[in-house]
Amino acid sequence: MGVLLEVKNLTKKFGGLTAVNDFSFEINRGEFIGLIGPNGAGKTTIFNLISGMEKPTSGSIHFDGIDISGKLPFRIVNLGIARTFQLVRSFKFLSLLDNVQVSCLSKRGKAASKTIGTEAYASSILRSVGLIDKASVPPIVLPHGDLRKLQIAKAIGSNPELLLLDEPFSGLSYEEQVGITDLIKKLHSEGVTIFMTGHVLRELMALVPRVIAMHQGKFIADGPPSEVANNKIVLEAYLGKGEGFA
Amino acid sequence: MFASDLLEMLYVGSADGAITALVAIGFSLVYGVGGVTNLAHGAYFMLAGYMLLWILTWGPIFSELIWLSVVIVLVIIAFIGALSYLVLIKPLQNSHINMILITFAFAFFLELIVKEISGTQPEPIDQYKLSDIIVVIGGVSMEVRVLLQIIIGLITVAIFGLFINKSKLGKSIRAVSQDKEAATLMGINSDRILLYTFIIASFLAGFAAYLAIPGANLMGPSMGWNYLTNSMAVVILGGLGSLTGSVVAAFILNYAMSFTLVFIPKGEIWTAIVPMVVIVVMLLVRPRGIFGKKELK
Amino acid sequence: MEVKMISKKSIKNKVSGTQNYLTTWIKSFSGSLTIFCLIILSFLPFFSQDRAYVSYFIPQFTFFFIYAIFAASWDIATGLAGQANFGQSIFFGLAGYIGGALIIEMGVPSWIAIIIAVIGATFIGFLVGIPALKIKGPYLMLVTLVLSFIILRVLATSHSGPPLYGYEGISGLPKLNPNPIIEYFILFISLIVCFIIMMSISKSKLGTILRSIRDDEIGSEASGINTMKYKLIAFMLCALFSGLAGIYFGLHYQTVNPAGNLSMTISFLAIIMAALGGIGTIRGSLVGAFFYVFLEFVLVEIGLDMDVVHIVFSIILLLVIRFASRGLLAPLLDRLRDLWDVLLGR
Ligand SMILES: Nc1ncnc2c1ncn2[C@@H]1O[C@H](COP(=O)(O)OP(=O)(O)OP(=O)(O)O)[C@@H](O)[C@H]1O
Ligand SMILES: [Mg+2]
């Protein structure tokens, strides 16, 4: 066990808007956590801060005891934090194999694939997410569900300890959601710590044992989903936005 | 001596500033509305200048009815602006690199054509000027022509501002530049709006050439690149989508350039560096520009 | 001991792997075509003893060799790594200047001057690459373009004596070799070596990384790639090869000057040849350069002025980008390949 990620008093301002406001939490090694909040709550911003895509206005982020706040994104990946994006992104003109191979070519990915080589390592990842049949096609021809799988495949090429998944279900049909859920569960059982966002509580409820809820950049609750779902402030946040969560 | 240098710097800088502002707002408009970095934008200015030169030699009707010549040139340049969008840019809109390459190739093509017709040497247009009068202020003899450039230039920018804020077309243009999808949902045809912005932009560049060139030199077919660079510097400095920002930035840039020209040894070489330094520094320090809301991508 | 044995074995494996690769490659369409072209090019200088042939037709091929290296070098930074570079003439021209000044002012032997010029160009590539770390797309394009204008102007207005000789430039450089046929073979071999290197880069993992930066820079960074480092590498590779082309070009003409070696037309040539062949393919540059050199040859033969020739090429470039962004000749090669397969009964 032990603390893997420690976020303390994290604040991010965009001009006059405070997207993340004095936010603190801890994640233990091996946990499976959800981060929820209505649209615009600041979830993606928190991921951007952890992964180094944005620099915090104040506050600190420690990963495995190392201060990572403000470090360059690729360095953070090589320390063991990988992420996916809310909007799918891929290397348009590279084959799926090469899409995954890029992260296997990062320092950390190379170390992990030392024995078998990056190409074989990337293939094994494609096989584990069920895209090996399409290894040589470019991502443009994939249906959205496969693109979501590809996002995860790209992220695990660098052999992360902590995986940040930003709305991994968005835009997916129910069947596709089940496929991704199984994939995430498998990764977790292999020892990867998972931290994922969602703005529909229902999607996360069945999956994660612990959720953190936020609203307008502020922390509101932390605990088992059943408790958080009944938290008064959480309910207000969602109802205020006019969004159902049940 | 020093004071009169300073005055000269101010007055040359202001005139160039007003003209650069006209060129730059067109460039910025096209970028804001369509995301198109039109590397041929400076070439519109250059071509319009040369067309003025050519048309005056067509015959006495053209050299006597100046306004007619100017109108013809402006119509042609607006038409070329429209064509460059419809024929070259629109079909390539989903490939950014090809879109930029084709505007580069088009600019180069226009430059070569002009070079073939008129050669590379600077050419004076002295058949007519905005005004012949010269006044002396603070020891500096100033041409009224230059004062007119400043005044007419700023008035044109103001009219453009009114148009973009008040007219129906102007409002549609703003809607598309703020949020293309929402504008499309509201029933605005964004392709047509982009076509109009190309027409307006090339027209403004042509009008700037009309203000700038008579009485001065055409600095050779490659001068379009200078105006393009200056426009980009202005947009970056002033911030995208801010008209005031563009005007202020155009003046700052040109003061800086005429300062370099007047006060720094071998200034004529180093003026070309000023816009580049502005671009690099602004992109590094404040990519949003002084007045801008959006970051340039 | 064991380690040693394993590494020996793996080298053996690699060697036999390479052999296998070579045999299948030669049997493949592009392999056969390449071998065919190489054979023709090797014998070409000996087809005729005619003076016009040796001193006029053969040098066209030396241009082809130089331009092909030059265009492909542009393709590395722009086509592979997506770093829009319109200042290609900087590396080309300055390498010529570095080499030329060394030869004329310091009496350095040509081959040493070539090596230093290439190293110098690579360093300049590093310097130009630094702004590319922050500046993207059209802005990078413009910054590199304007930088080339400024360097041109600084050189053109420099003091008209040694070492740079102002507008006139450096002249009196020695030929690579006084015999055009030997010059031909020096450049021919350089071309082969450069393309083997550039093609292997393109096919290697480095090539994959560069393409990932081109397709999605943020995504590449999020995959743990040090994109800054690789962008600099792309610029340096680009400058290295275009510097080599530039010093060869200077030695071929025996002069380097601002207008001839540093103008925007030079950058334009690299772009048009790469675009003709197909941007991002590297080997397309071979086809593009060939097409360019021989169309230019024909156009000049029929009496067109050089400026008109450039107009023709700018129109061709417009048409290629507009209607055939894969490049003019990639589709043609596909047709040929189909024909080949039919002939072999595949
Ligand atoms: N780069 C930025 N510049 C300015 N404002 C930003 C930026 N990124 C995010 N914001 C603002 O910060 C707030 C939080 O945004 P964020 O994307 O983190 O929310 P989210 O919880 O991920 O929402 P969603 O459910 O829509 O994904 C929003 O109001 C957003 O407009
Ligand atoms: Mg989000």
Image (tube, coloured by chain):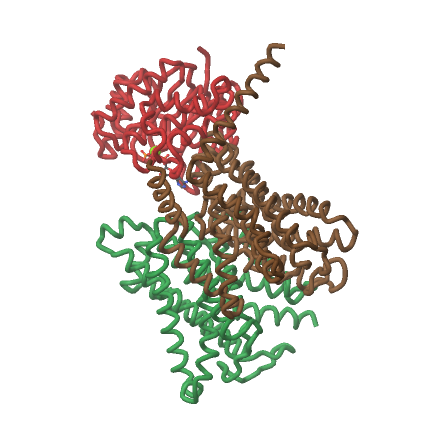
x and y percentages locating residue B35 in the rendered image: 38, 52
- Which of these two is toward me, B289 or A17? B289
Which quarter of the figure has residue B196?
A: bottom left
Q: Is residue A57 visible?
A: no
Which quarter of the figure has residue A186?
A: top left
Q: Is residue A69 visible?
A: yes
Q: Quadrant of the N terminus of chain B?
A: bottom right
Question: Which shade is chain B?
Answer: green
- Which of these two is toward me, C18 or C43? C43
x and y percentages locating residue C217 in the rendered image: 45, 38
- Which of these two is toward me, A137 or B126? A137
Position of residue B133 relative to residue C47, above or below, is below
x and y percentages locating residue C203 in the rendered image: 48, 35
Looking at the image, which residue is at 49% across and 28% down? A59
- Which of these two is toward me, C57 or A13? C57
Question: Which shade is chain C?
Answer: brown
Looking at the image, which residue is at 49% across and 63% down? C298
User: Horizontal placement of A164 versus C72: left or right?
Assistant: left
Count of numbered marks = 0
Q: Quadrant of ligand 1?
A: top left
Position of residue B173 relative to residue A198, above or below, is below
x and y percentages locating residue B87 in the rendered image: 34, 61
Question: Which shade is chain A?
Answer: red
